[in-house]
Amino acid sequence: MFKIELDGTASIHDQICSEISRLISVGILVPDEKLPAVRETAKALGVNPNTVQKAYAALEKNGLIYSVPAKGSYVAPGGTAAEAVRKEAAETLRAAMEKAAQTGVSRGTAEEIMNEIWGKKG
Amino acid sequence: MFKIELDGTASIHDQICSEISRLISVGILVPDEKLPAVRETAKALGVNPNTVQKAYAALEKNGLIYSVPAKGSYVAPGGTAAEAVRKEAAETLRAAMEKAAQTGVSRGTAEEIMNEIWGKKG
DNA sequence: AAACTGTATTACTCCGGATAATACAGTTGT
DNA sequence: ACAACTGTATTATCCGGAGTAATACAGTTT
């Protein structure tokens, strides 16, 4: 069972989505692996089941997981899950870059930050 | 007087902050220029004065503008204003990049996005 | 003195997030 | 077959933040 730090300002179901997305992309949660039940996750997180279900529903909508009634929720098969989460993350990154560029951040500055994070020039 | 599109999901005062930040960084709003009065801006935007004041207060807190009671609010002097907004934007960008990297986005993908936004390789 | 400025305070409404208590239908394990 | 579990749906309620509103104060400008 995974753990989630509920600390940020974002809504709880958003935080759950983000964390599960991360776990999938990193490979801790593998394709077709069964996720903890809605009620179980809720209990483990000290959160309302409905909140977790909302997160699961959003994840399914984005293609990260699939849920079958009366059985459970599973990580999307093959590479689709990790692919979906990276695509999503890439879109978020693009939005951040666009906004940064719009507010005057230069390409050079962006590159510097990139070097700090991904390591200098592959 | 500037105009602001109130469309996003973000709170109004946040949108006002973002737009003024952008205008400062781009140079439309120059150092020591007097900003429209709180009440005037509110009227122009069809928004409550308190909402605008909240935005101005946040901008002052971040060093983008300075307000003197009974006189007005002004863009921060010298390069400090534009510098402050870019620094802020850069931090936001760093956070986005860290999160992207954390969720599995490769440097190559990030570079591709960068090329689309800032133009290919300066 | 009048009209403007930023600032502060208080109260109210509205909405989304979160909780809560269920209920239903289908699967699994015994 | 039965109990226990699964995802899903519905409805109601509570709470906090966002936004509105109506003021008031003190200082500046004209």
Image: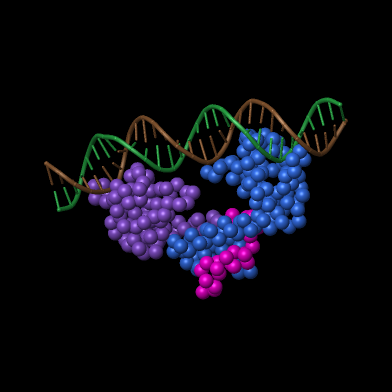
Chain colours: A blue, B purple, C brown, D green
Q: How many marks?
A: 0
Percent coordinates x, y for residue A87 in the rendering: 63, 58
Q: Magenta segment range?
A: B98-122
Q: Residue at the spot x=70%, y=36% of the render? A: A40
Q: Does the magenta stretch include residue B72?
A: no
Q: In which quarter of the image is residue B32?
A: bottom left
| A60 horizontally vs B116: left or right | right
* Residue A67 appearing in the image: yes
Percent coordinates x, y for residue D29 in the rendering: 18, 52
Closer to the camera in the image, B78 or A86: A86
Q: In which quarter of the image is the N terminus of chain A?
A: top right
* Residue B98 appearing in the image: no
Closer to the camera in the image, D9 or A76: D9
Closer to the camera in the image, C1 or B33: C1
Q: Residue at the spot x=63%, y=46% of the render? A: A58
| A81 horizontally vs A9: left or right | right
Percent coordinates x, y for residue B31 in the rendering: 32, 61
Q: Does the magenta stretch include residue B117?
A: yes
Q: Quadrant of the C terminus of chain A?
A: bottom right
Closer to the camera in the image, B4 or B101: B4
